[in-house]
Amino acid sequence: MNRKLILKAYGKINLGLDVVRRLENGYHQVRMIMQSVELADTVTMRRLSEDRIVLKTDKPGLPCDERNLAYKAASLMKEQFSLPSGVEIMLEKRIPVAAGMAGGSADCAAVLKGMNELFGLGASFEELQKIGVKLGADVPYCLMGGCALSEGIGEVLTALPKPPACTLLLAKPNINVSTKYVYESLRLDELKRHPDIDGIVQSIETGDLERLCGKLENVLESVTGKEYPVIGKIEESMKEEGALQALMSGSGPTVFGIFREREDAERAMERVRKENPDAEVFFSGFHA
Ligand code: ATP
């Protein structure tokens, strides 16, 4: 009865990110290529006999109340399914916060799945997606994971095959970027070009890593990259050490580099750490 459920909440990077237009409700219509990475938070959940939500985390400064997406997910599931008892959630954060890696959305998706399982609710994947999109545009993707084309505001998803294996280097400089600010500052009318999202899909389908790397692009770099030149500098360092490509993920500031050779990625890690002593730098890989 009082069993513990342990779930992995995987972070994501964007292999491509295009903003098609701004919608009247303030959301943006996007076309994004999402890819899960091995870097993950661990979410441990158990039922409580009392009717309350207890959230704990090992990340200092992260709110543990209704401001946390994991808390919001538990609260909404309790409401939707009229659950009379509560839940305890422990979040072990490994995905950098406010990084453009959807850490909050990943935790949110894990808690939606966890509530479904712990309370035996029997909600379908589609039902969880409908609940998830109320909590955040990236939540439906996080419920699915792997590689996907994400359209609409993020709720229209097409699964894609896993891209060819490579070594990923993730680097989050020590700056915090507000996703809302980045989207609001994007001047769509001033963009000279848009990423070739269909070309990225084709390269993934044919498994051509070099061609894929030649096409990676993120329109939000025109905002975050301009404000924080360190993003471009990290990309340059990774490329000089042999990355096939380096790009900012989401609204930033995390930069990922794609390497064919592990030794190149190791050299790049050393260099990025030396040049940015306060950055968080990790090896990772694509997660299916
Ligand atoms: P995205 O890629 O979807 O824009 P992100 O990586 O930029 O997400 P998150 O790490 O999800 O950003 O967090 C953004 C903000 O949300 C933070 O300021 C944080 O306080 C808040 N937040 C709420 N819940 C969580 C959570 N479970 N984990 C991390 N941040 C959370």
Image (tube, helix red, strand yellow):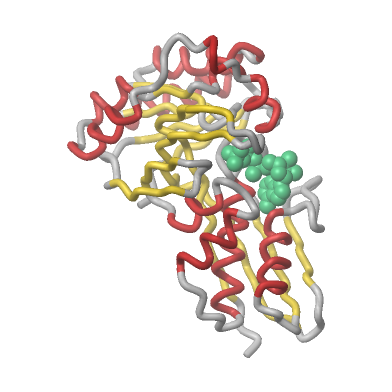
Which residue is pictured at 34% across the width and 23% down the height? 196
Q: Residue at x 39, y 17 (%)?
A: 241
Q: Where is residue 216 drawn, in percent x and y?
A: 37, 24
Write down the quadrant of residue 186 in the picture: top right
> Which of 137/256 is in front?
137
Quadrant of image for the N terminus? bottom right
Give the quarter the ligand 1 occupies: top right
Left or right, 8 with respect to 261, comes to: right
Q: Tell me if 167 is positioned left or right of 53 in this view.
A: left
The tally of labels here is 0
- Asked which quadrant contains residue 163, the reply is top left
Give the farthest residue toward the bottom: 1
**Front residue (pair 225, 233):** 225
Q: Residue 275, can we see it?
A: no
Residue occupying the point 70% across, 27% down: 181
* Depicted 193 relative to depicted 126: above or below: above
In the foreground, 180 or 241: 180
**Relative to 49, does residue 158 appear above or below in the rendering?**
above
- Does the rendering let one see residue 202? yes
Where 85 sits versus 146, above or below? below
Q: Whole-percent x and y of residue 167? A: 36, 35
Q: Position of residue 136 (x, y in %)?
A: 62, 49
Q: Residue at x 51, y 36 (%)?
A: 282
**Left or right side of 145 for 8:** right
- Taking the view exactly as shown, the residue that stands out farthest to the left is 206
Image coordinates of residue 155 in percent, x first then y, are 49, 49
